[in-house]
């Protein structure tokens, strides 16, 4: 039976080779795990045990099982990762390949350094010297990699909700993985251990990983900038709507004041017609006066100024397009959802409803809006006439009718709902497209 210290060496190496990189891979998606933290921890513990058992199998069972053990370890790691993370497949695959490249670099670098400092032990598997070198390499890599994951990569995968850009981006780390794997392990005349012990191979792998990280950084920064540009466009759009509506309100107030000022004049004329008994002339005058009155459109739908401005803006658009516009809104002025998010939420939902009704050919076109604050939950529903066919991507995202790719409006709504720990749902029922959103106070 092997000595106890050999089991300890295998346990230490297996955990060093598995847990730090798994933690880095899970960090960007820590808020999007499929299971609870307790269940996820139990699964990680089981995977750690399997890693240790595979290391013991390679070390103590006669024969060369390293390749099979490595394949099994990678397959189990990938299966757990895709099962545990509830995000777009492209995002998870990109992250998995990126971290796998770094893990391979750390392992080969540690083995190379071990070969330089402990040449005798380096020819053996899973020795304490290897674990010590791997720990040192991981310490050196952990700080810059974690800062990148925290400040750049995580915001990129969180703020880009659809995953559309990531559908092909995973090919970048996959290409680097294939390049370094082929360049180092395609030499059949040398074993993997001999190749890893050569400093020039480690240097080559270092250069590849530096180039890869630079590309990862540029790609994620571009995604962040793209998201910021879209957010600015969305905010400018909402601000423009509010500005137009405020102008309309000011015009209505001016018209109301003018009408009040003229009311005495009208009363005098009416009195004159009545006193003379000229009823036909009076009726004609009243009809003309009624046509000159300001629009009877509601000045206030709810107490919340941001929601009210958007509702008023689209009320005029609905009237201009002969669309029935039904609103029941009970939203207080002071609410946990920011004015910007309320503008984006209502703006996207109602704008999509207006656009959909414009495409309908029938006379019975309507938009039914319900919004209220129930306790600590904002509930919003926007239903509109719809007899067409929904177009979706392979990821079940709605395709835009204005440009290629998923609709930005529905993505923004989903993003806001997720931001406030809520949910949103889109469905077609009884000739109506029904959008429902709930936002919770945290």
Image (spheres, rainbow, N blue to C red):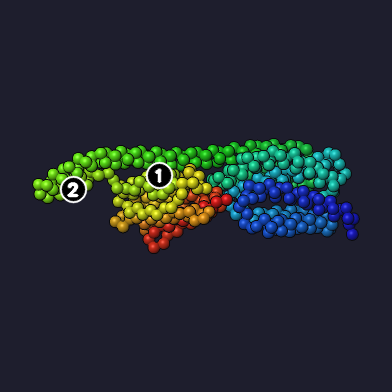
Q: Which circle marks residue 287 in the picture?
A: 2
**Residue ID for mark 1:** 309
Lateral position of residue 65 relative to residue 311, left or right? right
Return the residue nearer the eye: 248 or 349.
248
Q: Please give the name of the residue rendered at 75% of the width and 49% of the height, measured from the top-left corner.
A: 17
Q: Residue furthest bottom?
A: 430
Of mark 1 and mark 2, the one earlier in the sequence is: 2
Report how far apart the C-alphas of labels 1 and 2 lie in the structure: 31 Å
Residue 179: tell me if it is visible: yes
Q: Position of residue 355 (x, y in %)?
A: 37, 49
Q: Please give the name of the residue rendered at 46% of the width and 49% of the height, measured from the top-left corner.
A: 332
Return the residue nearer the eye: 126 or 141.
141
Q: Please give the name of the residue rendered at 49% of the width and 56% of the height, measured from the top-left corner.
A: 374
Compared to residue 84, the image places residue 144 above or below, namely: above
User: Quick one: SS at disc 2?
Assistant: helix
Q: Position of residue 400 (x, y in %)?
A: 44, 49
Picture quadrant of residue 41: bottom right
Disc 1 packing (10 Å; few <14; some 14–19; many ≥20):
many
């Amino acid at each position: 039976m092997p000595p106890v210290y050999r089991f300890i060496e295998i346990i230490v190496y297996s955990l060093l080779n598995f847990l730090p990189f798994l933690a880095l891979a899970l960090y960007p998606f820590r808020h999007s795990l499929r299971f609870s933290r307790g269940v996820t921890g139990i699964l990680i513990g089981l995977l750690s045990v399997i890693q240790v058992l595979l290391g013991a199998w390679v070390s103590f069972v006669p024969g060369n099982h390293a390749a099979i053990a490595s394949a099994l370890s990678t397959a189990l790691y990938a299966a757990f990762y895709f099962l545990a993370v509830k995000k777009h497949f492209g995002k998870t695959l990109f992250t998995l390949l990126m971290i796998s490249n770094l893990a391979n670099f750390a392992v080969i670098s540690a083995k190379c350094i071990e070969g330089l400092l402990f040449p005798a032990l380096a020819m053996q598997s899973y020795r304490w010297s290897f674990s010590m070198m791997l720990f040192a390499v991981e310490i050196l890599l952990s700080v810059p990699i974690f800062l990148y994951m925290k400040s750049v990569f995580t915001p990129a995968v969180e703020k880009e909700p659809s995953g559309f850009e990531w559908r092909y981006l995973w090919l970048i780390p996959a290409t680097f993985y294939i390049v370094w794997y082929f360049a180092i392990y395609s030499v059949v005349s040398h074993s993997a251990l001999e190749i890893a012990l050569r400093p020039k191979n480690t240097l080559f792998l270092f250069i590849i990983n530096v180039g890869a990280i630079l590309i990862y950084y540029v790609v994620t920064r571009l995604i962040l900038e793209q998201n910021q540009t879209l957010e600015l466009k969305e905010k400018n759009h909402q601000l423009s709507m509010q500005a137009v509506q405020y102008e309309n309100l000011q015009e209505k107030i001016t018209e109301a004041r003018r009408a009040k000022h003229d009311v005495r004049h009208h009363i005098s004329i009416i009195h004159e017609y009545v006193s003379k008994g000229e009823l036909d002339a009076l009726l004609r005058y009243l009809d003309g006066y009624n046509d000159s009155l300001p629009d009877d459109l509601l000045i206030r739908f709810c107490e919340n100024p941001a929601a009210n401005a958007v509702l008023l803006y689209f009320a005029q658009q609905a009237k201009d397009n002969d669309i029935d516009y039904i609103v029941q809104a009970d939203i207080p002025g002071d609410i946990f959802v920011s004015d910007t998010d309320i503008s984006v939420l209502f703006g996207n939902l109602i704008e999509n409803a207006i656009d959909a009704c414009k495409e309908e050919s029938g006379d019975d076109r309507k938009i039914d809006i319900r919004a209220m604050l129930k306790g600590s939950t904002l509930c919003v529903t926007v239903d509109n006439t719809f007899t067409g066919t929904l177009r979706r991507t392979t990821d079940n995202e709605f395709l835009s009718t204005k440009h290629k790719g998923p609709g930005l409006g529905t993505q923004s709504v989903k993003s806001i709902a997720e931001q406030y720990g809520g949910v949103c749902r889109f469905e077609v029922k009884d000739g109506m497209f029904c959008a429902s959103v709930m936002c919770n106070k945290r």
